[in-house]
């Protein structure tokens, strides 16, 4: 039986999960961790010499920097190529730009005011800033909690995603190496950590997410303990960013809403409303081959600048397009959650991700599965509130569900579920005398799409917004799986 070829100084088989680099002399492959070469550092090497070949041939040869405004810094600087996002020149230029004040769109609230009842009544369509945290339910480490403390609680050997800001490229490294970089007297690069989810670590006990993010979360309310799919953990992120870190314009995965607290340091958010026009422009910009050369904030009528200082919690609603600049070294905590208040926008964002062919790594885990769980709960709720069954039912949707091989939970029959749910919606229409298909009703509600939501399930109110959001849920969330007969 043939044995697998062995590589590196450790003489181990190839491991797809570990970064490796090829020696340009002996052509052997080496684990970066075995030869002290970080993945983000490898891009700077022009000719690599492994430890053995370094003895007769000398050290590796490094690439020469020719510019400060391109992701590929070896390109000659002839003045003809535009500045790219994240580079040194880009950050300098960004800091001199003029933006509309976030005072126009930001709601300032006390922590005790940010409640489920308030958002159900007033909507959650604009960002909220909270500086007085009492009553918010948020618990965090003390303000002197350090990057070294993160390593102590999470573990130095944990592999984390790190963004090389000047290249806007993602790579992996061990947390202890990032800590070493962070405390270096001179940082050769701007590295940014924004996706360290720590729910499965000891640090999780130090953080309690805001009450509103727990009570409204689809995952917390509807994800069953016995689900075949692993529960999505997206509520506890630690962000460690050095000065001049930049994240380009984006919408958070699955159209999730975001809570974001700056423990120390400072962040600057550049916020854009998710209007139909802006979303169309965003999709066009996202699919452009020269996206990094175009500052999206210039393509819309207004881009708002919001400075988030130490001790402030920011809530960003569904669909808001935003970029983030770290103006000074910063540690922040945050999380994402799907909820009932902006169903239409969540689905619109998810559909956009599908059109843009967003990699699974950057999508909400099992988004379609949670939609099925919510639909099942909705069906049970609607059936429970219909005490009278004598009204004539309108015809259900003339559709056939093709059951996908993935993300349909056990014990859910898609065809049966959608037909039963459609019947309940139509019955609710008959009982209330309101049709969600009325054009005037739909046009008006499409701007807000608020579904009242009570603890433990959907509201028993027969308001128009319940009808419309329910209809949206069926026609967009579930029919995303449907092929018309």
Image: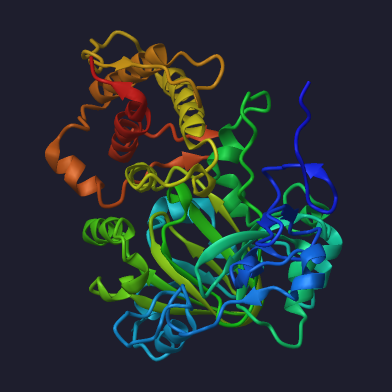
Res. 449 visible in picture? yes
Q: Which quadrant of the figure contains the C terminus? A: top left
- Residue 152 is drawn in which quadrant? bottom right
**Residue visible at 78% across and 55% down in the picture:** 158
Residue 363 placement, left or right of 296: right
Q: Residue furthest front?
A: 56
Residue 172: give x, y in percent of width and height: 66, 58
Residue 447 placement, left or right of 328: left
Q: Which quadrant of the figure contains the N terminus? A: top right
**Residue visible at 34% across and 48% down in the picture:** 356
- Residue 292 is drawn in which quadrant? bottom left
**Residue visible at 76% across and 25% down in the picture:** 2
User: Tag count in the figure?
Assistant: 0
Residue 252: give x, y in percent of width and height: 46, 55
Is 291 or 26 nearer to us in this picture?
26
317 lies above or below 57? above
Res. 142 visible in picture? no
Residue 292 placement, left or right of 170: left
Display coloring: rainbow
Is 122 or 74 nearer to us in this picture?
74
Is 325 or 46 nearer to us in this picture?
46
Q: Residue furthest bottom?
A: 96
472 lies above or below 385? below
Is 218 or 6 nearer to us in this picture?
6
């Amino acid at each position: 039986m043939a044995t697998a070829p062995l590589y590196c100084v450790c003489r181990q088989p190839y491991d797809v999960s570990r970064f490796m680099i090829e020696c340009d002399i002996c052509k052997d492959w080496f684990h970066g961790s075995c030869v002290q070469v970080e993945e983000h550092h490898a891009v700077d090497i022009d000719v690599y010499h492994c430890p053995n070949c370094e003895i007769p041939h000398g050290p590796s040869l490094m690439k020469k920097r020719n510019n400060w405004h391109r992701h590929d810094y070896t390109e000659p600087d002839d003045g003809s190529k535009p500045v790219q996002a994240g580079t040194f020149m880009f950050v300098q230029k960004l800091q001199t730009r003029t933006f509309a004040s976030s005072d126009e769109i930001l709601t300032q609230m006390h922590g005790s005011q940010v409640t489920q009842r308030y958002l159900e009544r007033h909507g959650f369509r604009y960002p909220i800033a909270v500086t007085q945290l009492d009553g918010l339910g948020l618990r965090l480490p003390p303000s002197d909690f350090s990057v070294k403390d993160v390593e102590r609680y999470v573990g130095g050997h944990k592999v984390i995603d790190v963004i090389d800001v000047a290249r806007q490229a993602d790579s992996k490294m061990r947390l202890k190496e990032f800590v070493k970089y962070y405390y270096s007297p001179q940082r050769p690069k701007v590295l940014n950590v924004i996706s360290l989810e720590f729910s499965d670590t000891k640090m999780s006990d130090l953080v309690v997410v805001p009450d509103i993010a727990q009570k409204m979360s689809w995952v917390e309310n509807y994800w069953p303990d016995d689900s075949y799919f692993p529960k999505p953990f997206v509520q506890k992120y630690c962000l460690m960013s050095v000065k001049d870190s930049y994240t380009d314009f984006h919408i958070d995965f699955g159209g999730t809403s975001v809570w974001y607290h700056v423990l120390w340091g400072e962040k600057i958010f550049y916020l854009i409303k998710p209007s139909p026009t802006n979303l169309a422009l965003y999709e066009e910009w996202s699919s452009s081959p020269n996206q990094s050369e175009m500052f999206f904030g210039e393509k819309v009528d207004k881009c708002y600048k919001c400075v988030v200082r130490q001790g402030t919690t920011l809530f960003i609603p569904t669909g808001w397009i935003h970029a983030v600049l770290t103006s000074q070294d910063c540690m922040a905590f945050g999380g994402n959650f799907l909820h009932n208040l902006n169903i239409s926008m969540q689905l619109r964002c998810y559909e956009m991700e599908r059109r843009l062919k967003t990699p699974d790594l950057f999508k909400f885990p099992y988004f379609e599965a949670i939609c099925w769980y919510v639909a099942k709960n909705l069906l049970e709720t609607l059936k429970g509130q219909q005490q009278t069954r004598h009204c004539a039912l309108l015809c259900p949707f003339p559709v056939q569900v093709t059951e996908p091989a993935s993300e349909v939970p056990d014990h859910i029959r898609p065809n049966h579920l959608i037909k039963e749910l459609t019947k309940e919606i139509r019955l609710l229409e008959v009982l209330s005398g309101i049709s969600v298909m009325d054009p005037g009703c739909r046009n008006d509600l499409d701007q807000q799409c608020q579904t009242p939501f009570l603890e433990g399930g959907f509201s028993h109110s027969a308001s128009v917004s319940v009808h419309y959001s329910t209809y949206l849920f069926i026609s967009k969330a579930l029919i995303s799986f449907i092929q018309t007969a």
